[in-house]
Image (cartoon, grey):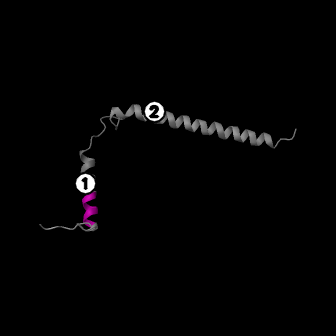
Amino acid sequence: MLSRTRSNRPSLPIPVQEHLGRMLRADYFERSDKPQYVGDPALPLEFIPHLDRLARSEHTARLNRIREQGRKAVADALSGLVL
């Protein structure tokens, strides 16, 4: 039985790989579903609840950071006040 050893080197030259990659990406773009109208969701509808939840959590985290930075700014401003 012959044992084949594989090399880590690519079997095709880099320029050929890049050309084939460009052709495959162009073909994929041509064959992919296009929106039927402005506002047509590009993602499957199953993703929408997950994306909404992610957006809400990011919004909440952003509001919390803003609130904390505001509290710190007010505390720093008041600490410099001489009564």
Q: Earlier in the sequence, mark 1 or mark 2?
A: 1
Question: Is the residue under label 2 in contact with that under label 1 (CB below 8 Å)?
Answer: no
Residue 17 image point, x, y percent: 26, 63
Looking at the rendering, which quadrant does residue 63 occupy?
top right
Q: Amino acid at mark 2?
A: Arg
- The residue under label 1 is 24
Give the side of residue 55 with respect to residue 80, left or right.
left
Residues 21 and 72: in front is: 72
- The residue under label 2 is 53
Give the side of residue 69 with respect to residue 39, left or right.
right
Residue with the most extreme front position? 1
Residue with the most extreme left position? 1
Give the prevailing secondary structure in the magenta stretch: helix
Residues 24 and 66: in front is: 66
The N terminus: image quadrant: bottom left
Residue 31 image point, x, y percent: 23, 45
CA gap, disc 1 and disc 2: 34 Å
23 to 42, vertically: above or below: below
Residue at 61% from the left image edge and 39% from the top image edge: 65
Residue at 24% from the left image edge and 59% from the top image edge: 20
Residues 82 and 22: in front is: 82
Residue 43 image point, x, y percent: 34, 37
Residue at 71% from the left image edge and 41% from the top image edge: 73
- Residue range in magenta is 15-21
